[in-house]
Image (cartoon, rainbow, N blue to C red):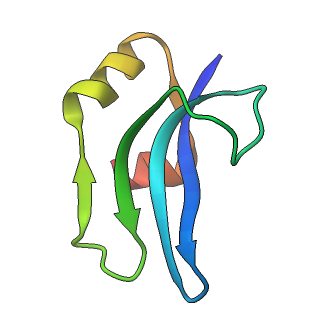
Amino acid sequence: MIKIRLKACGRKQRATYRIVAIDVKSRSEGRALQELSFYKKMNKNETRLIYSAIVHFLELGAQPTETVHGIL
């Protein structure tokens, strides 16, 4: 099963996240199937989404987490 979830990156006090499609069985910071976008918590206006990739994984049956669902 594939999930669409956040993957933390950045540094302390300046957290940024990548929205990735990842297998459920892999660890949260493990290798992603594909990076779909990024999200900066500090600047909510600075979110870049790759809609074609997101729609592709949703059609394959990927389940977004609650946080990612809120961002999308």
Q: Looking at the picture, how far across and down is residue 47, in whole percent?
A: 27, 61
Give the residue at the far top of this rendering.
Answer: 60
Name which residue lies at 69% across and 40% down. 30
Q: Looking at the picture, how far across and down is residue 1, in whole percent?
A: 65, 16
Position above or below: 56 against 13: above
In this image, 21 relative to 59: left or right? Answer: right
Near-viewer residue (42 or 59): 42
Near-viewer residue (16 or 55): 16
Q: Looking at the picture, how far across and down is residue 32, in whole percent?
A: 56, 33
Q: Looking at the picture, how far across and down is residue 58, in whole percent?
A: 39, 21
Position above or below: 19 against 51: below
Name which residue lies at 37% across and 12% down. 59
Position above or below: 17 against 68: below
Position above or below: 36 against 13: above
Give the residue at the far bottom of this rendering.
Answer: 13
Q: Quadrant of residue 28?
A: top right
Name which residue lies at 75% across and 31% down. 26
Name which residue lies at 63% across and 35% down. 31
In this image, 41 relative to 4: left or right? Answer: left
In this image, 44 relative to 41: left or right? Answer: left
